[in-house]
Amino acid sequence: MSNGVSGTGFGAVLNTPTVESSTGSTSNTTAMARVASPAPTWPGCAGSSTSPSPGWGYSLLLTAGQQVTVTPPTTFTTDLNASNLYIEAPSLSASGSTTLQNAVLGMAADQVMVAGSPLTGAQAGGFGLGSAGSGPGGSTVNLAGLNATANTAEIAGSLTLQSLSIRVVPGSATSC
């Protein structure tokens, strides 16, 4: 979760990555969006992950930057940033307004480029969201109230977090 996200060079494709279950078996039947930006910034983030271990379940809670609010602010100042951030998520939504600029909805997934490189997992002819512009700048996204159920988050460059807090708590936590 975050109060918002701002990024230039944004792109997204639908794919079916290999996902491992809690039993160790794998499948590639879960559709996900692979979303990327070479330089996203955002005002605060909060995330949680719960271990399904029988008898001793726990949750890992991560917060950084500004406090994430239930109702996203209409404007925000960013204090977290990354380079080459990739997220695979079966669910991603914005509870506030979203602005896309220079974007093409329905671009062939294998033609979506982020920072001059194609997104891995893109299937030829599949649905993509890409840039109408040229070069690594291309499309931009600004959204308020990000909420994603991410399967993976990959930072292929760097990640700068202000006021990082990581906590482990017993049980199943649903919020930070």
Image (cartoon, rainbow, N blue to C red):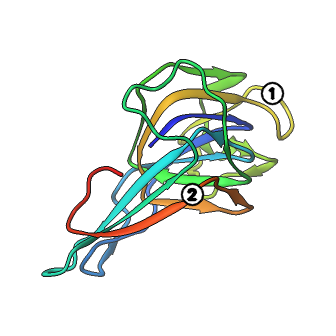
- The numbered disc on residue 121 is 2
- Dot 2 or dot 1, earlier in sequence: 2
> Residue 136: x percent and y percent?
83, 41
> Residue 101: x percent and y percent?
69, 21
> Residue 37: x percent and y percent?
68, 44
> Residue 38: x percent and y percent?
74, 47
Q: How many marks?
A: 2
Q: Nearer the viewer, residue 37 or 70?
A: 70
Residue at the spot 65% in from the left edge and 25% down from the top edge: 104
Residue at the spot 43% in from the left edge and 56% down from the top edge: 16
Q: Tag 1's secondary structure?
A: loop
Q: Would you say 168 lies left or right of 129 here? A: left
Q: Tag 2's secondary structure?
A: loop
Q: Amino acid at mark 2?
A: Gly
Q: Is residue 111 above or below residue 104?
A: below
Residue at the spot 45% in from the left edge and 49% down from the top edge: 46
